[in-house]
Amino acid sequence: MGTRGVTEEEARAYVDRLIEDRDGRLDVGEEALGWLGEQARAGRIRLLGHDPGSPEEVEELCDRGGAVAEFPTTAEAAKSAREHAMPVVMGAPNVLRGHSHNGNASGRELVGRGLVTALASDYLPSGLLGAALLLAEEGLTTLPAAVGLVTGGAAYVAGLHDRGRLEAGLRADLVLAEPGRPWPVVAAVLRAGSGGEAA
């Protein structure tokens, strides 16, 4: 199209070509999802469903071999995922804001209803600790349960069974932090060495 002005007719024709091109490749997506479903059902991968919006979409995810509902867009979808024993992941930024940036389900509300298994950084790693402390401060869950959303819950969702909880025989990474405004203050990070000892 170059740098000259584009007429409305040219713009419509361009978009129509894009849509036609996309529609011509839809079978590739279905083929890829079918293959991923086979891998998930065989236990080779963990298949996460991004933004399921309804119980029907959660059902489809289960049928496809999905194991995790990531960022369900409605409370109904989150509830359906939990009824299917599927972990639910929400984003820390959603919790910090108090709502989704685009009108989807509120992470705070879902945590308060006991529907969230883990929090993800969702492009804001520094938000994880702040979100956990905020959830406890607002009484939506206890402090241990809130911290568990970013430790044990996240490890469980990722299939990392050797970490995330303070139990004998597990990898014991620790973060010493204190609440602060606007962000918690991390005083120290103690990381398990290769033999399990603190490094």
Image: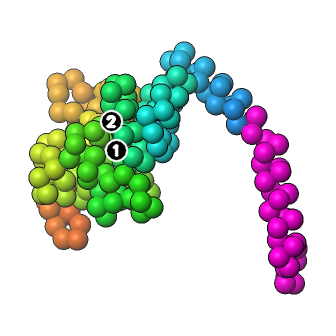
Q: Which residue sits at x=26%, y=51%?
A: 109
* For residue 95, side relative to residue 8 (left or right): left
In this rendering, the answer to whether 127 lies above or below 193 is below
Magenta-highlighted residues: 1-27
Which amino acid lies under the numbered mark 1 shown in the image of this protein? Ala
Residue 11 lies in the magenta-colored region = yes
- The residue sitting at 24% across, 46% down in the picture is 111
Rendered position, 83 above or below 182:
above
The amino acid at mark 2 is: Lys
Q: Position of residue 43 (x, y in %)?
A: 50, 18
What distance separates the C-alpha of mark 2 from that of mark 1?
Answer: 6 Å
State the colouring used for the structure image: rainbow
* Residue 158 visible in image: no
Q: Is residue 125 left or right of residue 169?
A: right
Mark 2 Cα within 10 Å, few/some/many (few <14, many 20+)?
Answer: many
Is residue 127 highlighted in magenta?
no
Residue at 43 percent of width and 34 percent of height: 55
Q: Position of residue 46 (x, y in %)?
A: 49, 28
Q: Which residue is mark 2?
A: 79
In this picture, residue 4 sits left or right of residue 126: right
Please name the residue shown 37% across and 25% down the image: 84
Residue that badge 1 annotates: 75
Of helix, strand and loop, which one carries label 1?
helix
